Image (spheres, rainbow, N blue to C red):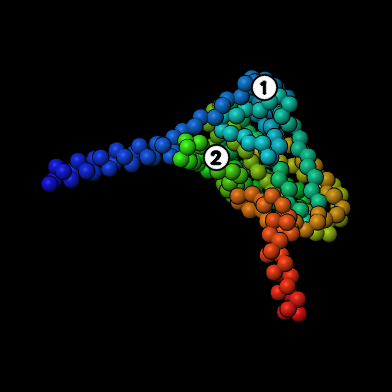
Amino acid sequence: QDAAGQAFVTELRQKQEQQFYVEYSENKPILPTYAVPTTTAQPLASKVLISQRHYMDDVQATDWPKAEELVSQLAMQVAQDEYEPLTVNLYARQAMRLTNAQLSLPGLDIQAYSVRYKLTRAVMDGTRYVNAPALLDNLQFPLDIASGQSRRLWFSVHAPAGFTQTQVKGSLKLAFADGSSTELPVTVKVLPFTLPTQDVPIGYLGSVPGYLSTAFNDAVVAQRNAAILHA
């Protein structure tokens, strides 16, 4: 009985390992086909490259920037009472430890995040999907960046309702454990209006394909009728 029980446990563990590696097998991303930029324009170019890519375009750990993505200053625009992302990508030529990233924009609300990716999942036909969008974690220090890898910093910038300034100037300061640091000027154009209220449900899994009145017409009519009856 002991031998049979041990054989059962051994077989169970083997099947669990097989299922685990089917579900969570490693999918290595395709490396960029362009060369790592060579530049001396950035103060820390020998250690880390600072770049910017549209926030809807992924920056994987194995990515590196294109030459035209390298930046020495940052700019963005935001409407009143709008939250808009400002992203910065760090590519480490050698192992680096980020100890501080301070975005200063007087009068604007700022929240700092780092980008994290969920596990890739498999479905019955063998297709693998990555769970998108990427997750935002509160930026914590130190943040280690391995040599030859990239990390994205994500800052949420909010202009309060009724904000009167049309332009805000500030800076992004980056500091590393080896004592090196750099500072980038940041300019924010604040548009003198608020955006229309969004009536499309938006959440972790995205948004519905149409407006509420077209995607959930029955629910809209029922809610309207209930409001009339209540009145």
- The spot of residue 155 in percent (x, y) is 68, 46
Report how far apart the C-alphas of labels 2 and 1 lie in the structure: 29 Å
- Front-most of residues 175 and 222: 222
- Judge whether residue 54 can be spotted in this image: yes
Q: The C terminus is located in which quarter?
A: bottom right
- Front-most of residues 218 and 224: 218
Asked if 212 appears above or below 33 in the picture, the reply is below
**Secondary structure type for disc 2:** strand
Question: Image quarter for residue 173?
Answer: top right
Judge depth for marks 2 and 1 and give the one in front.
2
Furthest residue in direction left, as rendered: 1
- Judge whether residue 94 can be spotted in this image: no
- The reply to whether callout 2 and callout 1 are in contact (CB within 8 Å) is no
Which residue: 71% across, 61% down?
217
Asked if 209 appears above or below 223 in the picture, the reply is above
Which residue: 69% across, 40% down?
55
Q: Residues within 10 Å of mark 1 (few under 14, many from 20)?
A: some
Q: Is residue 13 left or right of residue 149?
A: left
Which residue: 47% across, 37% down?
125
Q: Specify the amino acid type for callout 2.
A: Val
Q: Residues within 10 Å of mark 2 (few under 14, many from 20)?
A: few
Disc 2 designates what residue? 130
- The spot of residue 191 in percent (x, y) is 85, 50
Asked if 102 appears above or below 31 in the picture, the reply is below
Q: Specify the amino acid type for callout 1.
A: Pro
Residue 37 badge? 1
- Front-most of residues 204 and 19: 19
Q: Is residue 180 left or right of residue 3?
A: right
